[in-house]
Amino acid sequence: MQPDPVRDARLAALRAEVRAIESPAGRGAGLCLPFGIDAIDRRLADGGLAVAALHEAAADRPGLPDEAAATLFLASIAARREGPVLWALARRDLFAPGLAGAGLKPGRVLYAECGRDEDVLAVMEEGLRHGGLAAVVGEARRVPMAATRRLQLAAEEGATPALMLRRRRKPAEDPLAAPSAAVTRWRVAAAPSSPLAAAGIGRPRWQLTLARQRGGEPHHWLLEAANAQARLALPAGAEHRAGPARAAA
């Protein structure tokens, strides 16, 4: 059979496509997890959160309210994917009913109690490379740039979201000040709850800031907090605007 350059080129292209599909990195390439809120999704470079990627969140201010809001924000993201969720703990302060209120049922969570940040990062990386989890969540104070690159590569290999809660080492510290390979970085703050016609406590609200995203601009929203179906909501007349100047750093 005589060589056919056109046919050989087509075969080579098909083989490359098959290798990309079969490779671990190819399984999650291009997949995203939208919030289902146009005001948010259209501001994200991928139309949602890239599945095979590292995403970070931190409390906007020191203190339990913002820490809890940031934790529940990540829990609601993990809950929107089917399957078990691995959560690497730095300390025993997770409240299972609170996670369930954000859509992440206790029976879905695999807890890994880690005493050091290095152990949290190692557990996260191992879980991400497994490829059979809905998401991997970790909490750490000190996360070197090299570690975030490893987590990003592991997320790509396992086609699994890596969700990192960046905790403060000191009250005045900005957890997102250090460089990171994360595709998106978020700040979450508790806000006054929704007003009710009668006396009572309305649905909680969050001030959500997209501090940084790869290939896109920062932004800011006032949102109704995640409900038991892991869904956020944009309240009527809500503020959503370009992120503050510090968020672009």
Image: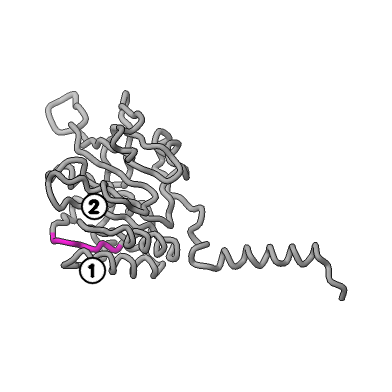
Determine if the magenta segment contains residue 214. Answer: no
Determine the residue positioned at 19% across, 52% down: 167
What whole-number distance in Å separates the C-alpha atoms at marks 1 and 2?
Answer: 15 Å
Q: Residues within 10 Å of mark 1 (few under 14, many from 20)?
A: some
Task: Classify the position of the N terminus by image quarter.
Answer: bottom right
User: Is 197 situated left or right of 31 in this image?
Assistant: left
Dot 2 lies on which element? strand
Q: Amino acid at mark 2?
A: Arg
Q: Residues within 10 Å of mark 2 (few under 14, many from 20)?
A: many
Dot 1 lies on which element? helix
Determine the residue positioned at 73% across, 66% down: 11
Determine if the magenta segment contains residue 88. Answer: yes
Can you identify the residue that label 2 sits on?
166
Q: Pick the residue in front: 107 or 206.
A: 206
Q: What x and y, as percent, mark residue 135?
A: 35, 59
- Does residue 117 sit above or below 193 in this rendering? below
- Residue 34 sits in which quadrant? top left
Q: What x and y, as percent, mark residue 217?
A: 41, 37
- The image's mark for residue 119 is 1
User: Is 224 situated left or right of 91 in this image?
Assistant: right
- Residue 113 sits in which quadrant? bottom left
Q: Residue furthest right?
A: 2
Q: Pick the residue in front: 118 or 77.
A: 118
Magenta stretch in the rendered image: 86-92
- Does residue 13 sit above or below 230 in this rendering? below
Q: Pick the residue in front: 212 or 55.
A: 212
Determine the residue positioned at 35% across, 35% down: 219
